Image (cartoon, rainbow, N blue to C red):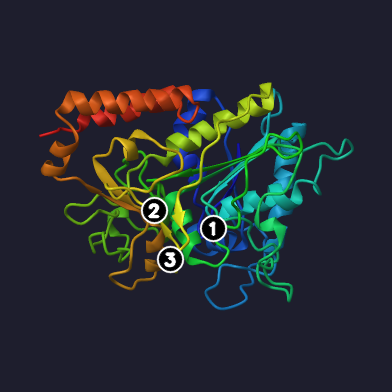
Amino acid sequence: MIEPLNPSAGFDIAGVWDRSRDYFVRNGDVFVGWTSKSVVVNALKTQFDPTRYAALDWTYQPPTPGSNNGAYDGITFDIAAQIGALFKANGPTSPLHGYRVERVFESGFSQDGSFTFTQANSFHALERMPQTRKDIFDGYVPMGTNGPSNIDFGLTPAGALPPADPRHAMQPRDVPVIQADTETEIFIGTLIPGGLAYRRPDSDAKNDRLRIWEVPGGSHVSNDHRDPALTLELDGADLAHVPVADIPPLGCAHLLFQPGPARGVPGVVSPNDYPFAFAQNAAFQALKLWVEIGLPPAHVPFIDVDTTTVPARIVRDSSGNATGGLRTPFVDVPVTSYTPFDTVAHVTASSGFCILYGFNTPFDDAQLASLYRNDVDYDVKFALDALRLVKERLWLLPDAGAAIGRALEVKIP
């Protein structure tokens, strides 16, 4: 599994690994992350370890001061193909030489999810294995994305794709794609003209295998594993050479305004602990089965959006959770309401990321008592729905077990 690491914060973020590390380790898969933009190479050379990274040469030339886009970043897609080809050929220079490489997949989340979308949509047909001209990547899982990245990084008169360009949606290709999005991407898509243009029907056609899974409750930035600190916070502290306890606060409205790992204000869980990872893991397993034995993944409806309002809005149920999408017991047997974005309470250097931070608000005792007779009633309903997802191949059994473990922690008054 190869991920072009996310450069949005100016350092490498392994969004795919961070959520699916247990899945990869459990399967004995190999995960490869690579620095995908010149801004991060510049940070490695000037901030993190100038001696170790002195030999790296990827010119960083931002179009405007402070921008993380450079005139030399168009090679990102070529580098992705070269790395994929290195592992696919598995010759003497490959780190895996001597092992049997079965498949090579690409996946990314957020900005690198858009890179992966674009790799599949535009470059897959152009960049092929040397001599044989066969596929480099056997399939793709773009996630946390509203569609393609800007191929020219905004540096030529051509600009971004025009609104009617069909490449806003995934076009036919000869390997399968499973796109998995959190609720945050749908929310952002309702705010931007054409923000949901990636939506199109699923397909099982041989030259156009596609699934799109949208996951209500999931948020772009979340703490799926309930770690003491997010990996991106640990990475940021490493880059700045400070203890994680000293990293500055983000400034989001539902986070305490204090240094250190993000913590929700009283009565709120933030960052959101909805485990989008469980759907992500199922997408990887579904892609593998689709490629290896031709087993098509499950179809999932889109999250419901009311387009009669301006801007459009996500439709919510009586518990405050989004309707439609990949239904899980976290939203259908709820004990909390999930909000896929936050607002800015204090303007900081990083508060622009608040829109990506989801949070959830646990129900009070009265609301819990109105929904469930007792702990057993809640636990049984949750477990049955979790096992339904396993049967439909939208969750994997180990993840369903972990989810049921969370449910057993809940106490119904």
Looking at the image, the residue that sits furthest to the front is 308
Q: Nearer the viewer, residue 14 or 113?
A: 113
Quadrant for residue 89, please give it: top right
Residue of label 1: 7
Quadrant for residue 405, please give it: top left
Residue of label 3: 309
Number of residues whose C-alpha sits closer than 10 Å to that of mark 1, classed few (under 14), some (14–19) or many (20 or more): many
Q: Which callout, 2 or 1, points to the residue nearer the camera?
A: 2
Q: Secondary structure at mark 2?
A: loop
Number of residues whose C-alpha sits closer than 10 Å to that of mark 2, classed few (under 14), some (14–19) or many (20 or more): some
Number of residues whose C-alpha sits closer than 10 Å to that of mark 3, classed few (under 14), some (14–19) or many (20 or more): few
Q: Secondary structure at mark 1?
A: loop
Q: Is residue 271 above or below residue 29?
A: below
Residue of label 2: 315
Residue 342 location (% of width, % of height) = 34, 61
Residue 112 location (% of width, % of height) = 58, 52
Measure the alpha-carbon separation of dots 2 and 1: 32 Å
Residue at position x 54%, y 58% in the image: 7
Q: Hey, what amino acid is under mark 1?
A: Pro
Seen in the image, is 58 located left or right of residue 322? right
Q: Quadrant of the N terminus?
A: top right
Between disc 3 and disc 1, whose residue precedes?
A: 1
Residue at position x 76%, y 38% in the image: 207
Seen in the image, is 336 located left or right of residue 205? left
Contact (Cβ within 8 Å) of mark 2 with mark 1: no
Between disc 3 and disc 2, whose residue precedes?
A: 3
Q: Hey, what amino acid is under mark 2?
A: Val
Measure the alpha-carbon separation of dots 3 and 2: 11 Å
For residue 103, say whether it is visible: yes
Contact (Cβ within 8 Å) of mark 3 with mark 1: no
